[in-house]
């Protein structure tokens, strides 16, 4: 019975991950094919997940993630912030720029953790909870690069704020998380800023892995 329950849980999680890929939902038949499961098994999983609010079906019968997952996401953000703070503090002090952790929410990037350097005369004020399109700014571009399998850093200037320079790298190796670590400043950035950002992203990935 324990093995059967574990298998059901694993199948349910696979189904949720499949629905989380951003596509416009799927029919139960498509889910059955992509998960290599029979339709009766898929229907049983969907019934349980719909009862718990984790999936929903639209008027056309397509299955989408339900709003119940938002409760889980809101609970995860404080955990992400706590895990990121040590790496972000070191990064902000080393580079002398505001460091941040950004996660993907749909087509936007959401800043969930921000640390400002303690020793600089001037730095960028970047508010936790700030949103911006993934296509703009180093943090968003790094997340888009992650989706393409890239693990290098990205540099932008003036895309989100005039005169601001940003460097960001994706947090790799965590299939459940689309995120980047970066720094932003109004001043010049040393050549070593890119590798330091990559190292901080790898440190965070190790802490969360």
Image (cartoon, helix red, strand yellow):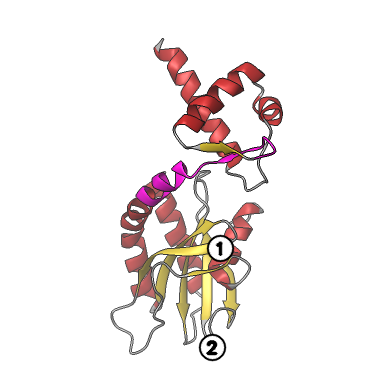
Magenta stretch? 59-75
Q: Quadrant of the C terminus?
A: top left
Residue carrying label 2:
163
| Residue 57, above or below 169 | above
Image-quadrant location for residue 160: bottom right
Which mark is nearer the camera, 2 or 1?
1
| Residue 122, above or below 56 | below
Task: Where is residue 104? Give x, y as percent.
Answer: 53, 57
Q: Is residue 12 magenta?
A: no
Residue carrying label 1:
108
**Residue depicted at x 46% and y 58%:** 201
Task: Where is residue 122? Give x, y as percent.
Answer: 37, 88
Q: Give the CA distance from mark 2 to mark 1.
A: 22 Å
Q: Name the residue nearer the viewer: 4 or 158.
A: 4
Q: Is residue 71 magenta?
A: yes
Task: Where is residue 126? Give x, y as percent.
Answer: 41, 76
Asked if residue 131 lies left or right of residue 157, the reply is left
Asked if residue 132 lies left or right of residue 38, the reply is left
Question: Is disc 1 placed on a helix, strand or loop?
Answer: strand
Asked if residue 207 lies left or right of residue 153, the reply is left
| Residue 6, above or below 97 | above
Q: Residues within 10 Å of mark 1 (few under 14, many from 20)?
A: some
- Which residue extends farthest top? 1
- Which residue extends farthest front? 59
């Amino acid at each position: 019975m324990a093995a059967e329950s574990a298998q059901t849980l694993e199948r349910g999680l696979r189904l949720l991950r499949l629905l989380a890929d951003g596509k416009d939902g799927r029919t139960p038949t498509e889910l059955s094919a992509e998960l290599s499961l029979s339709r009766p098994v898929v229907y049983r999983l969907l019934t349980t997940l719909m009862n718990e609010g984790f999936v929903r079906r639209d008027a056309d019968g397509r299955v989408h993630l339900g709003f119940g997952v938002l409760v889980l996401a809101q609970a995860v953000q404080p955990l992400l912030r706590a895990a990121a703070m040590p790496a972000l503090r070191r990064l902000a002090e080393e580079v002398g720029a505001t460091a941040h952790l950004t996660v993907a929410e749909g087509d936007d990037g959401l800043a969930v953790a921000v640390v400002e350097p303690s020793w600089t005369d001037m730095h960028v004020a970047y508010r936790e909870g700030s949103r911006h399109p993934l296509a703009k700014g180093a943090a968003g571009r790094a997340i888009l690069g992650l989706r393409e399998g890239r693990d290098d850093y990205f540099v932008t200037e003036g895309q989100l704020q005039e005169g601001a320079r940003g460097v960001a790298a994706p947090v790799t190796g965590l299939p459940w998380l689309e995120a980047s670590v970066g720094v932003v400043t109004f001043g010049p950035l040393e050549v070593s800023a890119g590798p330091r950002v990559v190292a901080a992203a790898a440190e965070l990935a190790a802490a969360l892995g």
